[in-house]
Amino acid sequence: MPKMGVYTKADADADIAVHAADLDAHMMDFLQLLRTGEYLGYPFHKGAVDWAMSANVLYASPFYIARKLTVDRIAINVITAGIAGTRGRLGIYNLDTNLYPGALIVDGGEVAVDAVAVVAATINQALTKGIYFTALVSNGTPSIKTLYSTWTAMGEFATDLVTVKGAWTVTFTYAALPNLFTAGGALTSHTPVILPRVKSLD
């Protein structure tokens, strides 16, 4: 208990130390509780569906990181294969103004999307707390998993107030990911599942 009379910094430090466990229990952000070696999913969602991509369209799905960490994969789940030789590129973008993707953080390179499989690009990228976007573009039309009911920060469509603005899309001829996310994108009503994997908690 606080003592009577002069209360020093040492006294305050001692009180904080005594109650540190209580503070941790009450103030902990549950989104900081992560397992290494696992893919970083969305905190709130239900039901995934199969969705056919459009060729030469760059997609960006938002994801939230609650603590410093390092990611070592970016993965998608190919449900219907593209034709032989179809490729995709995966990457991560920073957040820019008004919840639009900004500068490229990492281009994970190409993955084959001409077979049914979970495919991943290998990276090694440290990230700090905040909102980011995982990105995907393909030169074909494979189908991947997407979410129609999930958390995003971009809001709901004004036409019905219940349809989620789940991801950004913009026309982009298949190539290495641009250093700045292409301007003029539109919001779509679902969130392509493009997930990073946690390597370490930093």
Image (spheres, rainbow, N blue to C red):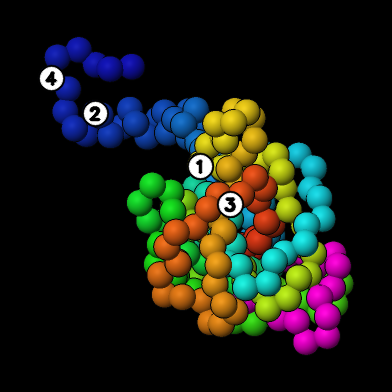
The residue at the point 49 percent across, 47 percent down is 66
Mark sitting earlier along the chain (3/4) = 4
The amino acid sitting under disc 3 is Ala
Mark sitting earlier along the chain (2/4) = 4
Q: Which quadrant would residue 44 be assigned to in this image?
A: top right
**Secondary element at tag 3:** strand
The amino acid sitting under disc 1 is Met
Report if the CB atoms under discs 3 and 4 are less than 8 Å apart.
no
The residue at the point 50 percent across, 28 percent down is 26
Callout 1 environment at 10 Å: few (<14), some (14 to 19), or many (20+)? Answer: some
The residue at the point 28 percent across, 34 percent down is 13
In the depicted structure, whether residue 71 falls above or below residue 28: below
Mark sitting earlier along the chain (1/3) = 1
Numbered circle sitting on residue 176: none
Label 1 – label 3 distance at C-alpha: 8 Å
| Residue 157, position as x, y percentages in the image | 57, 35
Identify the residue under disc 2: 11
- In-image side of 166 versus 116 (left or right): left
Callout 4 environment at 10 Å: few (<14), some (14 to 19), or many (20+)? Answer: few
Identify the residue under disc 3: 167
The span shown in magenta is 76-89
In this orientation, which residue lies closer to the viewer: 12 or 107? Answer: 107
Callout 2 environment at 10 Å: few (<14), some (14 to 19), or many (20+)? Answer: some
The residue at the point 51 percent across, 41 percent down is 153
Identify the residue under disc 4: 6
The amino acid sitting under disc 2 is Asp
Mark sitting earlier along the chain (2/3) = 2
In this orientation, which residue lies closer to the viewer: 24 or 146? Answer: 146
In this orientation, which residue lies closer to the viewer: 126 or 100? Answer: 100
